[in-house]
């Protein structure tokens, strides 16, 4: 029995470590070897300036939409080569009235609210340029974002280009610390993923697409950006990453808002895995499967389960007196979860202590996976999601 528990414990520990640290280290080693053999990857062509549509889906954004429009119109891109479309289906505040004040922007509106995916699918019927940039309504972009994204499409093998998400300094509490640290790590992994072959899912805050490759995802799709980019991957095209093109947004206004956001993402993860099952076949998608499983699948499935199995098996091994090593690992786990608990209590008081908040945010993300899984299988997570409350940016 002790041998079986030992296998469970060490396998669980390996899966957790590989999912969050090991994959990144192995990925870095692989791209170092690739650089030695083939040199550094070529960047895009700055002279490639094709016609493009800038598409924003908004819902009841009256407090921010004017700033979003001004930021969009200030893009450093030839005015005769960029068209702006804002789709606001279901909005019931002054969003449409504000957009109507800007003749440069095409407003698409339908009184029925079916969710972001339905709105984007409808708006894509009005896109007649070879490329389209999708951007969230609550983000601000740097002026050169569109130009930087477009230059990668000079390579005909590129189907999608993902920009970077940056969390702006805010007046909010500790949730900004956790979200910011998480996205810095994710951005590094995206950079390495793209250098090896392709980004494992683009962020919806800023994503550019080769229009002819766009497939209308199902209207109940929760993670639209994820599904769009991977379905283009499945057609044999790469998803590239451009960190110099970035979308800035504030962190969630509270832990409750961050919790809702994480649970929704995790529920969408389970939905996406079900719809992207062919990607698990390495014989069919040899360039994608390893990255996809290591970066995405494990974090939404085996890693959270392994955290639970590790502490349970460790406890039984200590009781069975299987060895001093299990006393040490048991104490280490208790200390880690104790630090996470302290981080949670401090976060509730809007205090930032990195050494406690990192363990808390790690546990927080994995708990969200369990809740998201339950929500998805109980069909309780709608694709039509209420607008998240964000913190106020520091002026």
Image (spheres, rainbow, N blue to C red):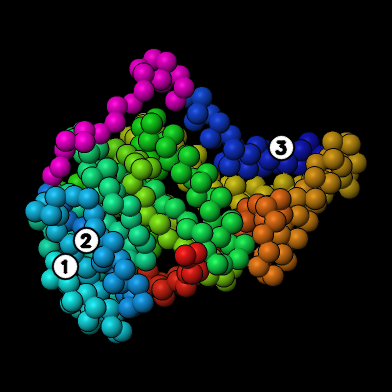
Residue at x 17%, y 72% (from the top left corner): 102
Q: Which residues are magenta?
A: 31-50
Residue at x 56%, y 67% (from the top left corner): 172
Q: Is residue 319 above or below residue 151?
A: below
> Closer to the observer: label 1 or label 3?
1
Disc 2, SS: helix
Image mark for residue 10: 3
> Closer to the observer: label 2 or label 3?
2
Q: Which residue is mark 1?
A: 105
**Lower position in the chain sequence, tag 1 or tag 3:** 3
Q: Is residue 15 above or below residue 95?
A: above
**What predominant SS class does the magenta segment belong to?**
loop
**Lower position in the chain sequence, tag 1 or tag 2:** 2
Residue 360 belongs to magenta span: no
Residue at x 68%, y 40% (from the top left corner): 13
The image shows residue 87 at horizontal and vertical percentages of 22, 70
Nearer to the camera, 103 or 311 = 103
| Label 2 crowd (10 A; few <14 / some 14-19 / many >=20) | some
Residue 289 shows in the view: no
Q: Which residue is mark 2?
A: 73
Q: In which image quadrant can residue 57 be found?
A: bottom left
Disc 1, SS: strand
Residue 46 belongs to magenta span: yes
Q: In which image quadrant can residue 171 be found?
A: bottom right
**How far is the residue under mark 1 from the one under mark 2?**
9 Å
Residue at x 31%, y 84% (from the top left corner): 93
Q: Are marks 1 and 2 in contact (CB under 8 Å)?
A: yes
Residue situated furthest top in the rendering: 37
| Label 1 crowd (10 A; few <14 / some 14-19 / many >=20) | some
**How far is the residue under mark 2 from the one under mark 3?**
54 Å
Q: Is residue 54 above or below residue 31?
A: below
């Amino acid at each position: 029995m002790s041998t079986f528990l030992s296998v469970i414990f060490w396998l669980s520990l390996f899966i957790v470590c590989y999912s969050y640290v090991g994959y990144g280290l192995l990925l870095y080693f692989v791209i170092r070897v690739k650089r030695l053999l083939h040199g550094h990857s070529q960047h895009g062509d700055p002279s490639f300036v094709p016609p493009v549509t800038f598409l924003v889906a908004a819902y009841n954004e009256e407090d921010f939409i004017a700033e979003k429009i001004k930021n969009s119109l200030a893009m450093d891109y030839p005015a005769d080569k960029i068209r702006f479309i804002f789709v606001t289906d279901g909005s019931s505040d002054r969003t449409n009235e504000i957009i109507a004040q800007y003749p440069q922007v095409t407003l698409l509106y339908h009184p029925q609210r079916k969710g972001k995916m339905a709105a984007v699918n409808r708006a894509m019927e009005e896109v007649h340029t070879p490329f389209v940039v999708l951007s969230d309504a609550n983000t601000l972009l740097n002026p050169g974002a569109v130009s930087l994204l477009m230059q990668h499409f000079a390579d005909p093998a590129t189907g999608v280009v993902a920009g970077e998400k940056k969390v702006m300094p805010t007046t909010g509490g500790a949730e900004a610390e956790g979200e910011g640290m998480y996205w810095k790590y994710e951005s590094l992994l995206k950079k390495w993923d793209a250098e090896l072959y392709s980004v494992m899912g683009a962020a919806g805050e800023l994503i550019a697409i080769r229009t002819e490759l766009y497939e209308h995802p199902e209207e109940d799709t929760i993670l639209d950006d994820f599904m769009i980019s991977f379905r283009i991957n499945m057609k044999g095209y790469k998803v590239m990453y451009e960190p110099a093109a970035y979308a800035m947004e504030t962190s969630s206004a509270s832990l409750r808002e961050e919790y809702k956001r994480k649970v929704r993402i995790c529920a969408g993860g389970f939905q996406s895995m079900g719809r992207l099952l062919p990607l698990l076949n390495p014989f069919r998608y040899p360039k994608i499967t390893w990255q996809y499983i290591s970066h995405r699948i494990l974090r939404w499935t085996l890693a959270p389960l392994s955290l639970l199995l590790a502490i349970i098996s460790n406890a039984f091994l200590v009781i069975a007196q299987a060895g001093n090593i299990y006393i040490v690992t048991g104490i280490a786990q208790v200390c880690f979860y104790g630090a996470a608990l302290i981080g949670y209590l401090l976060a509730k008081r809007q205090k930032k202590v990195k050494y406690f908040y990192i363990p808390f945010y790690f546990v927080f993300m994995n708990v969200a996976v369990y809740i998201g899984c339950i929500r998805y299988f109980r069909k309780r997570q709608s694709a039509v999601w209420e607008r998240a409350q964000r913190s106020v940016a520091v002026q």
